[in-house]
Image (cartoon, helix red, strand yellow):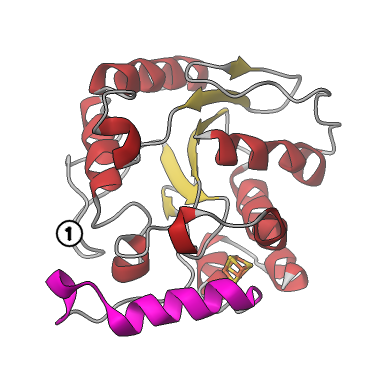
Amino acid sequence: MAARARRAADLPDLDGAVSGCFACPRLVAWREEVARTKRAAFRHQEYWGRPVPGFGVPDAPIAILGLAPAAHGGNRTGRIFTGDRSGDVLFAALHRAGLANQPTSVARDDGLTLRATRIFSAVRCAPPDNKPTPGERDTCAPWLHRELELIRPTLRVVVALGAFAWAAWWPALRAVYGVRPPSPRPVFGHGAHWSGTAVPEVLGCYHVSQQNTFTGRLTPRMLDEVFIRAKQVAGVD
Ligand code: SF4
């Protein structure tokens, strides 16, 4: 699997290759079971039920790094943060920031396009309870690292959504940039910021999960502040 990720010549090749990955037995079983049993509201839909590739422009200065696809969101629609409440919050914010052409993301053919931005997750398959294991994160890392290599020429800032994505970022410094990760690791928090030499800057942002947005832990204004800062760092108007 790692060799296949390294061989990916471009993003379409990578997207196609990751969609056929079966490296994590627990996650393969879960994604397929969810796709078979379905949520009642979506019982007439064909679920994607496979790994979910990244989405966005190939020359992105801004990357948004999430945790993993949602069981009835990305795992259903085949596009990251598409068809669930987390995506509703995220794409509304990206639209306000001028980074998405529309505020909603409901299906792969809904006309959504991004500007200056690419979105992907640390783990590409939906995990039970939204909790991948550290081993699954490490197994999936070659897909993330190859995607970062392919957008490396333009990438200036990474917005890490939540502590899991924040933790998944640091090994990429060595794997993609040949740079030793900081030790101790910078502590995750909303508004956390890290910069190094000749590597993308990293911004911490609470995850756009319902747990955070319904409770007011993460508000639209807080998201707007993160994306304003990301645009400043990336030099995007
Ligand atoms: S989580 Fe990643 S490595 Fe594991 S099966 Fe899915 S795509 Fe493959």
Going 64% across and 60% down the picture, which residue do you hit? 143
- As drawn, 193 above or below 58: above
Residue 135 position, x and y percent, is 72, 59
Q: Can residue 111 be seen?
A: yes
Closer to the camera in the image, 33 or 54: 33
Residue 28 lies in the magenta stretch:
yes
Amino acid type, label 1: Asp
Residue 165 position, x and y percent, is 57, 40
Q: Quadrant of the C terminus?
A: top left
Compared across the picture, whether 195 is left or right of 81 comes to right
Q: Secondary structure at mark 1?
A: loop
Magenta segment main secondary structure: helix
Q: Which residue is mark 1?
A: 110
- As drawn, 66 above or below 189: below
Residue 12 position, x and y percent, is 50, 66
Label 1 Cα neighbours within 10 Å, binned few <14 / some 14-19 / many ≥20: few
Q: Can residue 154 be seen?
A: no
How many marks on residues? 1
Closer to the camera in the image, 18 or 27: 27
Region of the chain picked out in magenta, as a range: 23-44
Compared across the picture, whether 164 is left or right of 191 comes to right
Going 73% across and 64% down the picture, which residue do you hit? 6
**Which quadrant of the frame does ligand 1 lie within?**
bottom right
Closer to the camera in the image, 117 or 182: 182
- As drawn, 106 above or below 217: below
Compared across the picture, whether 171 is left or right of 152 comes to right
Going 25% across and 53% down the picture, which residue do you hit? 84
Going 30% across and 64% down the picture, which residue do you hit? 72
Instruction: Give the image quarter of residue 154.
Output: top right
Q: Quadrant of the N terminus?
A: bottom right
